[in-house]
Amino acid sequence: ECSTHRNLFREFFSAPFQKTLALVDEAKKTEFLGVVERNLYKFEANSQQFPLTCLCSLLQHGKDAPKTQEKVTAWVSFLLEKLRRPAAPAGALPNTQAVLDVVEECLSAPFQKFVPIMEDSVRNRLADGLGERLAELHEEVPR
């Protein structure tokens, strides 16, 4: 079942699928996206649900719709929350894995699809949050 959801996830973000979906009449497309939204819980919570929620909103409401911006902002907030960590013990390195995970997700094709439509304030928040953690890592990594 896990590989099925992984394949479905990949397919939802593929260009041929999105081109085909664009040809479907609005009522059927809305119904289909509603089914996807109701079944989001079946997808991996940390890596697939946010992109799919954003995609469904984008396809239903458009890139400038408040609902779409709300979904993109929630995803960014989730990523920034992953970067927050309890204070590391003196001399310990920051949680490098969390930083690497967030950077990897920010570079992923699904996330990159939403960067151009992200509000400037959200994009700046993400850049600042990542920048702080990357600077911390750079300072703390032994040379």
Image: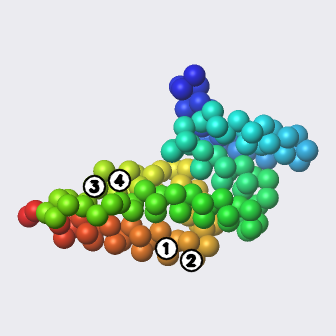
Amino acid type, callout 1: Arg
In this figure, which residue is indicated by the disc labeled 1? 125
Mark 3 and 4 residues: CB-CB less than 8 Å, in contact? yes
For the C terminus, give its image quadrant.
Answer: bottom left
Query: Which type of secondary structure does the marked residue at label 1 adopt?
Result: helix
The crowding category of the residue bearing disc 1, from other C-alpha atoms within 10 Å (few below 14, some 14 to 19, many at least 20), is some
Mark 2 and 4 residues: CB-CB less than 8 Å, in contact? no
Q: Residue at x 28, y 64 (%)?
A: 87
In this figure, which residue is indicated by the disc labeled 4? 98
For the N terminus, give its image quadrant.
Answer: top right
Amino acid type, callout 4: Ala
Give the mark, 2 or 4, whose residue is nearer the N terminus: 4
User: In the image, which is nearer the foreground, mark 3 or mark 2?
Assistant: 3
Alpha carbon of mark 1 to alpha carbon of mark 2: how far?
Answer: 6 Å
User: In the image, which is nearer the foreground, mark 2 or mark 4?
Assistant: 4
Above or below residue 123? Residue 30 is: above
Colour scheme of the picture? rainbow
In this figure, which residue is indicated by the disc labeled 3? 96
Q: Residue at x 78, y 43 (%)?
A: 33
Give the mark, 3 or 1, whose residue is nearer the N terminus: 3
Q: Residue at x 49, y 75 (%)?
A: 124
